[in-house]
Amino acid sequence: MAARSESVLLGKGEVIGLAMTAMLAGGHILLEDVPGVGKTLLARALARVLGGKFQRIQFTSDLLPADLTGSAVWDARKGEFIYREGPVMANVVLADEINRTSPRTQSALLEAMEERCVTVDGTTRKLPSPWLLIATQNPLDSEGTFPLPEAQMDRFMMRLSIGYPEAREEIRMLEMMGAGEQQAPEQLRPVVSPRQWEVMAEESRSVHCSPELLAYMVRVVQATRSAPELELGASPRASRDWLRAAQATAYIAGRDYVRPADLKVVATSVLAHRLAARGAYGQPDRELALRALARLLAETPLSAAGKAAAR
């Protein structure tokens, strides 16, 4: 699956692998980067290889909550109001430039992201299964953007950054474009069906994680809540997502147990965006949060039994 997506976004195998891990774990993905590096391209490719119904929502400043969740409309023939589905009623939803709409509209996704349902006119409706949200956003210092609420940031399993391509990959991209060989996401064929994906996701949740590694995770998460440089630490939801992402990593590797390396490979992507730094002169809050997390991961020891699990 990752190989097919990489045929669209060259040289980004690591980011694609993490995105696949989050999707298998049932988590939502936030792709944050500067314009033009392929955020929307990657999101479309991921949606195509998963299969199922796909909907793209272009977030703008005038978007309303009903434009996402759907609304009740009057049916003259039946003489009653009927529910008209919104684009959120799909297996994979791409929220493109999610931070270009108002906080009111952003918050319309909170129920969907956590409970997999939406409430319209007092009636709660379940979303299709599986249901995944892939959101893209430009940096917050870009013109016309609104910061995502903390409650919504916490509902994303991973925040990923694509970054600029290496020179050789950018040359290869231009060569393929010049020869008309670059593959569009719409040309990708689904690798699995939604039902198969659900089965794989359920199997990944049965991957064993030793009590020692669970205790290590809790020590790291609790350390973020008392770190002097952090104003906001990781939530219990972050602990849950960290475990699920590690289980999915082990499952993809063909193992039925979690190793310490599985926890560490996803730690930054799962935890960093949930942390808020106290701030300092000349240093962005995000940079401080990343440094604090790196320090805590390095300083929190594994028990002897946990180290044994690595072998």
Image (tube, rainbow, N blue to C red):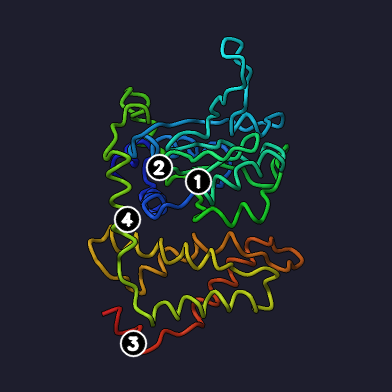
Labels 1, 3: front one: 1
Q: Earlier in the sequence, mark 2 or mark 4?
A: 2
| Kind of residue indicated by mark 2 | Ser
Gap in angstroms between the C-alphas marked 4 and 3: 27 Å
**Which class describes the residues within 10 Å of circle 2: few (<14), some (14-19), or many (20+)?**
some
Mark linked to residue 116: 1
Residue in the foreground of this view, choosing between 117 and 79: 79
Residue wearing tag 4: 202
Gap in angstroms between the C-alphas marked 2 and 4: 12 Å
Gap in angstroms between the C-alphas marked 4 and 1: 16 Å
Name the secondary structure under disc 2. Answer: loop
Residue wearing tag 2: 129
| Kind of residue indicated by mark 4 | Glu
Q: Earlier in the sequence, mark 4 or mark 1?
A: 1
Q: Earlier in the sequence, mark 4 or mark 3?
A: 4
* Residue at 50%, 46% in the rendered image: 116
Residue 129 in the image: x percent, y percent?
Answer: 40, 42
